[in-house]
Image: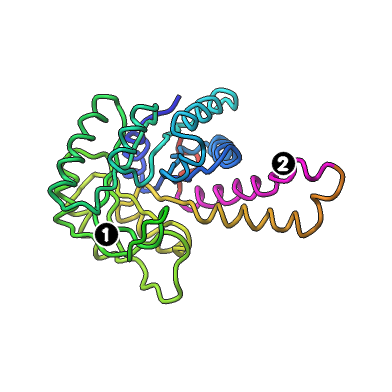
Amino acid sequence: MLVSAEEMLTKAKAGKYAVGQFNINNLEWTKAILQTAQELNSPVILGVSEGAGKYMCGYKTVVGMVNGMLEELNITVPVALHLDHGSYEGAKACIEAGFSSIMFDGSHYPIEENVAKTKELVAICKEKGMSIEAEVGSIGGEEDGVVGAGECADPEECKMIADLGVTMLAAGIGNIHGKYPENWAGLSFETLDAVQQKTGAMPLVLHGGTGIPADMIQKAISLGVSKINVNTECQLSFQEATRKYIEAGKDLEGKGFDPRKLLAPGTEAIKQTVKEKMELFGSVGKA
């Protein structure tokens, strides 16, 4: 059964580790992430961007697939199904479809409107026992066609949004989505520290977990980050394993063209990436 992310993140914050949000793109992705979480006895958050939700034929299809897998694969670790960077309309659609968690990204609205919309969604989520993530300060890089420069959030604004009753807060600390450029300045731990001082026990979220050096990830966790989002890294490992399979001509041997065989190496590669991340984040054995 899907659960809200609240309990797993409260435990993570108190225990100084982080739970990974791994974005799903199809059946293979979902299966690989769930099996790895179960194997490592780790809580997990499945992230769905609006673009991926559309690609997978809508939120109801995603909910049906995930619920079916939880049952068929006998998954007993806590699993949250979370809308990533949701619009106001997207958030409402996911609440309707049976997600257990949403992110409302109101960072592009004037702060007053962000506050009003967040308040409304917080009330609905509370009533339904769902968790809700909000964002302050845009996260750089590209997320489904939305490009931001990786700015740092204003700690006062963070407190204002945190006080509305959200479960977790994504604050921009110079992090970006996708691959990091050569000239990236690194994470702003001063900003993170200032945000944590204003928001107290609230779990903080780090978007753009791909390519941030391990020591920076660990320092961010020590400063209150309890949820780290990973997407690009799984895509890259899937792509690399699939390329190797085809370049080795394996798809031309016997029934190597069968999609179950063709996609198997990539699926294994996703599992390996998820395992490495769960070990780095410290969530192994924490279910």
- Residue 180 shown left or right of residue 92 in the figure: right
Residue 142 position in % (x across, y down): 41, 59
Foreground mark, 1 or 2, reads: 2
What residue is disc 2 on? 259
Residue 129 position in % (x across, y down): 30, 26
The residue located at (47%, 64%) in the rendering is 179
The residue located at (68%, 55%) in the rendering is 241
The residue located at (70%, 57%) in the rendering is 243
Could you say whether the residue bearing mark 1 is in a helix, strand or loop? Answer: helix
Residue 102 position in % (x across, y down): 34, 38
- Residue 280 shown left or right of residue 128 in the figure: right
Is residue 108 shown in magenta? Answer: no
Residue 192's disc number: 1
Q: Name the residue type under label 1.
A: Leu
Which quadrant of the view contains residue 71? Answer: top right
Q: Give the range drawn in magenta.
A: 255-281
Near-viewer residue (160 or 36)? 160
Could you say whether the residue bearing mark 2 is in a helix, strand or loop? Answer: helix
Tell me if residue 39 can be seen.
no
Near-viewer residue (74 or 124)? 124
Quadrant position of the N terminus in the picture: top left
Q: How crowded is mark 1: few (under 14 residues within 10 Å), some or many (20 or more)?
A: many
Tell me if residue 143 can be seen.
yes
Q: How crowded is mark 2: few (under 14 residues within 10 Å), some or many (20 or more)?
A: few
